[in-house]
Image (cartoon, helix red, strand yellow):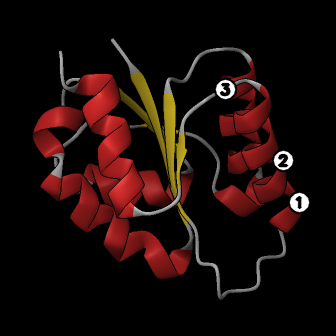
Amino acid sequence: MKTIALVAHDGKKAEMVAFVKDHKDSLSKAHIVATGTTGTYVRQTGLEVELKLSGPKGGDAQIAALAAEGKVDGIIFFRDPLGKHPHEPDIQMLMRICDLYNVPLATNPATGGLILDGLLASL
């Protein structure tokens, strides 16, 4: 089973929930792990979600650790490019880890759909 991580900044949580609803059939075939608040919203769609800490409290770092350990197959991170985030170093670290360990990372719904198609279409 593939593991997909979901992360969304506060201004993108509604967009993440809409994305999950649009791709619920595909995501139901995966193990989903998410940062705390994002995961709580995603659970409202009826999918099972393993919760980590909220992003500012270390959840982004926990997701990055999973990527570095080879325990996540893809990350969908809807980040707010116009917002200020006090945990920006954690966000940059997550993106760097994805590059370093060749983990697919989507930052918008278009690439998120492509990642899901690539990872989950044949399941």
**Residue 30 showing in the rendered view:** no
Q: Amino acid at mark 2?
A: Met
Instruction: Assign a secondary structure to mark 1.
Output: helix
Quarter residue 13 falls in: bottom left
Classify 17 as above or below 103. below
The disc label shown at residue 39, or none:
none
Quarter residue 9 falls in: bottom right
Q: Quadrant of the C terminus?
A: top left
**Marks 2 and 1 close (CB-CB < 8 Å):** yes
Q: Position of residue 104 (x, y in %)?
A: 54, 35
Side of 27 relative to 12 (left or right) = left
Q: Amino acid at mark 1?
A: Pro
The disc label shown at residue 93, or none:
2
Residue at x 89% of width, y 60% of height:
89
The disc label shown at residue 89, or none:
1
Quarter residue 86 falls in: bottom right
Crowd class of label 2 (few under 14; some 14 to 19; many from 20; radius 10 Å): some
Q: Earlier in the sequence, mark 1 or mark 3?
A: 1
The residue pinned by badge 3 equals 102
